[in-house]
Structure formats: C-alpha cells, structure tokens
Amino acid sequence: MKKLSLAQMKEKQRGRVAEVSAGQILQNKLMSMGIYKGREISMVSRFRLKGPVVVKVGRSVLALGHGMASKVIVEME
C-alpha cells in the first residue's frame, strides 16, 4: 500500500492512519480530535502553498494546519 502524509493527499482520497510521527503532546491533541492509528480519514479540501487541510474523520470535519497534517502518515486504499 502507498503511504503519504495527510498534507500530500489529493481531494476526495481516502485512507487509514498508519502513524503519527510527532511528540506526545501533538499525538494527544490529534487523538482528542479523533485522528489516531487505524482510523479511516478522507481529504475534503486543501489550500495551496502550505495552507490548511480539511479532512473528514468519522462524522467530524476538521481543519488542520499544514505542519500538523504533514506529521500524519496515511496508507492509501
């Protein structure tokens, strides 16, 4: 399976979170938003030039900064 960071995904792509390569504080913050290893996630939209990334996790739609999104590694389906 192909692995990409969340910031590299294209619109309407789906995948499963493979890992979060960040410190414990950021991992806890993402986990409180519902983003953790094994969770299905899909890209809603993204802004050019390192802008925010909008994703759907479960029934929630979240906007993440580019830096935070680049630390979430996703296995594509």
Image (cartoon, rainbow, N blue to C red):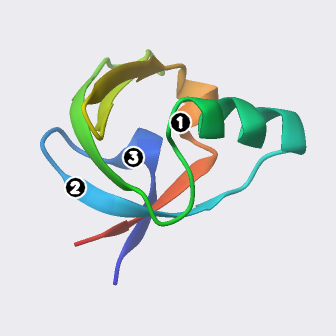
- Residue 43's x, y, as percent? 25, 39
Asked if the residue under mark 3 is in contact with the one under mark 1, i.e. CB atoms within 8 Å, the reply is no
Please give left or right for residue 71 compared with residue 5 in the image: right
Name the image quarter holding the C terminus. bottom left
**Which three-letter amino acid code belongs to the residue tagged 3?**
Gln
First of labels 1, 2 by sequence position: 2
Q: Residue furthest bottom?
A: 1
Q: Is residue 29 above or below residue 58?
A: above
**Which three-letter amino acid code belongs to the residue tagged 1?**
Ala
Q: Which mark is residue 69?
A: 1
Name the image quarter holding the N terminus. bottom left
- Residue 15's x, y, as percent? 29, 61
First of labels 3, 2 by sequence position: 3
Which residue position holds label 2? 14
Task: Residue 30: name its quadrant.
Answer: top right
- Residue 36's x, y, as percent? 56, 52
Asked if the residue under mark 2 is in contact with the one under mark 1, i.e. CB atoms within 8 Å, the reply is no
**Which three-letter amino acid code belongs to the residue tagged 2?**
Arg
First of labels 1, 3 by sequence position: 3
Between label 1 and label 3, give the one nearer the viewer.
1
Please give left or right for residue 53 compared with residue 72 in the image: left
Q: Is residue 53 above or below residue 9?
A: above
Distance between the alpha carbons at the discs numbered 3 and 2: 12 Å
Q: Residue at x 33, y 19 (%)?
A: 48
Q: Secondary structure at mark 3?
A: helix
Task: Residue 42: name its quadrant.
Answer: top left
Q: Residue at x 39, y 46 (%)?
A: 8
Q: Nearer the viewer, residue 62 or 47?
A: 62
Distance between the alpha carbons at the discs numbered 1 and 2: 14 Å
